[in-house]
Amino acid sequence: MSERQLSQEQQEFREFCQRWIEENKPDPHPIPLPQAAYEVTDPSHLTYLQEWQAKCYEAGLIASDLPKIYGGHEMTECQAIASAEVRKADVPYFINWIGLGMAVPTLLECGSEEQKARFLPPIFSGEEIWCQGFSEPGAGSDLASLQTSAVKEGDQWVINGSKVWTSLGHFAQFMLLLARHDKSDKYGGITYFLADMNQPGVTVKPIHKMTGESGFNEVFLDNATVPDAWRVGNVGDGWKVAMATLTSERGAGVGVGAVATESPTITMAQVIELAKTTRRNGRAVWDDPVWRDRLVKLYERIEAAVQNSRRAKLKHLNGGAMRIPLQGKLVGSEVGQELHHTALGILGLKSALYVRDPNAADDGKWPLGYMNTYTGTISGGSSEIQRNILGERVLGLPKTK
């Protein structure tokens, strides 16, 4: 949205956001933050990031457009402006990214009024952290095969089973939970719940990745309980509600605050600078025409993604059937991976130097970042799954046999 298209209120809000962010940018934490919010494990990082998110919420940069009855600020088409200013500023990410990016859109679309009033404000402020309980050891890409059970007992449900790859599960107060109430119906036998993580019967164990980080977790549910009032949608509507959550996770939902990703344009600028400062065979990599051609093509791809994102905000330019928004997760995750892969190529043998090696370029951020990009191309539905969705549901192509 260009300045010419902004209303006076929106232009004033943009100027306010720019000024407020500059004046309130927090000092760096004494211990450097992980590259992404899903890798935060240090309690002091959690407190630091919660305080930052709460300040942004109070200033109106989160839940800008939502009604005040839900804890919003009731502005008009200002959230996209706030999110854009946050993303391009050199500020910490929002820690409650699952709450903002998945729980809020799901509750707005499918939740009861009581659920919205209870859960939305503490999500905006970062007071209550959320995690996502979808994938299981035997149900990843084929999510509908999940086996975690939900049995109704009076006015509550008893949950037994396990979940895996649960980002922020070690800090979360609540979980978006899919469980099976009927084993005879693959899709219609699933119900969607909001589960309390701080109760007997919930055990969280970290998963240590090849990076050495452990932001992912396994969650074991042993006779955990959920009140029926915290069921989202009707019994058996879990798959439909889950699709609303996944639509938001894949970039096509209603945003209420910038999520935990670095702008690809910023990363692209860093890769170009790396090419200019890395020397090989007596000259900068940037001066090699082959490498420069590769970088320019990558730059063009990123610019196309940025312009597609702008088009997605206008219904008549969207291509119908959410075609452009549903590309967001696929394109964004793969561009991020290619950026880091390109950086490793620029570094050559130096790319083997890892975090905390005094000789590593940028403190080893490029090999660490490259390994972490596989989180994006796998989580929320792998790139292969995303292509199937685009082909079958958007383009109308036949399903493969």
Image (spheres, rainbow, N blue to C red):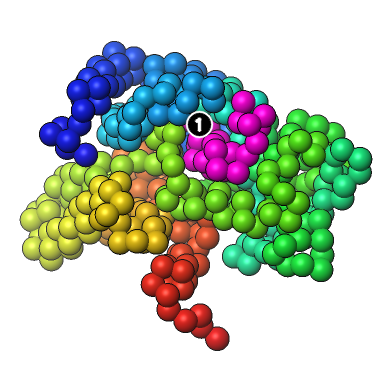
Residue at coordinates 48% horizontally, 48% vertically from top-left? 248
Residue at coordinates 45% horizontally, 46% vertically from top-left? 253
Mark 1 neighbour class, 10 Å CA radius: few under 14, some 14 to 19, many 20 or more:
many
Q: Which quadrant does the C terminus fall into? A: bottom right
Residue matched to label 1: 95
Type of amino acid at the residue the image marks with label 1: Ile
Whether residue 207 is visible, yes or no, is: no
Estimate the x, y position of residue 333 in percent, counting from the top left.
39, 55
Residue 260 placement: quadrant: top left
- What is the tally of numbered marks visible in this picture? 1
Estimate the x, y position of residue 109 in percent, counting from the top left.
55, 43
Estimate the x, y position of residue 86 in percent, counting from the top left.
33, 30
Per the picture, the main secondary structure of the magenta-coloured stretch is: helix
Residue at coordinates 18% horizontally, 48% vertically from top-left? 272
Which residue range is magenta in the image?
93-117
Relative to 250, is 126 above or below? above
Q: Is residue 202 left or right of residue 245?
A: right
